[in-house]
Image: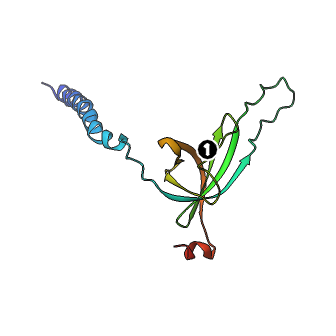
Amino acid sequence: MFASDRSRFSETKRIVLGSLFTPLVLLGVWPPSTMAATPQFQRAVVLRVDESTPTLPNRRRLADSPTPPTVYDFEVSLRVNCVVYVGFYQSAIDFLPSAIVVDHSVEVSIEKHFIHIKVAGGREIRLERTWRYRESNGSCSAGR
């Protein structure tokens, strides 16, 4: 074997071994990260519920785009301990579950982008989480 043949052989060997081991490493790391943990629900108090109007696209003429779909948006503010989470609930009909009433407590699970609320019948509804902030008034520390 010549030196160039050896280097080609070692390069081929490196590529083959790399292509075999890479999927094995990914399989070893991938399943735990894709397994969803069971959501942890905690008690929250509904602070505010407002019906919001969706922003409509800017149209110059009626023929420019189709009419926007009818969607009802509700902005819901929830307090968990001293943190207030605000989320949007969308409904095709003008309906907000009866569990979401101001000054009532609900069971919620807070995720990075969504808020899940347990409602009657063991169902869950999902709100799109928009922002959160810490309450700074004295009622938060007094309620602990």
Name the side, left or right, on which 22 lies relative to 44. left
Residue 54, above or below 20: below
In the displayed structure, does residue 104 sit left or right of residue 34?
A: right
The amino acid sitting under disc 1 is Pro
Which of the 4 image quarters holds residue 93? top right
Q: Position of residue 12 (x, y in %)?
A: 23, 27
* Mark 1 Cα-neighbour bin, 10 Å: few <14, some 14–19, many ≥20: few
x 73%, y 46%: residue = 52
Rendered position, 129 above or below 4 = below
Q: Which residue is mark 1?
A: 97
Left or right, 70 with reference to 100: right
Residue 122 lies, in percent from the top left, at: 47, 43
Q: Secondary structure at mark 1?
A: loop
User: How many labels, in total?
Assistant: 1
Q: Position of residue 106 (x, y in %)?
A: 54, 54
Residue 123: in sight, yes or no?
no
Residue drawn where x is 20% and y is 29% of the image: 13
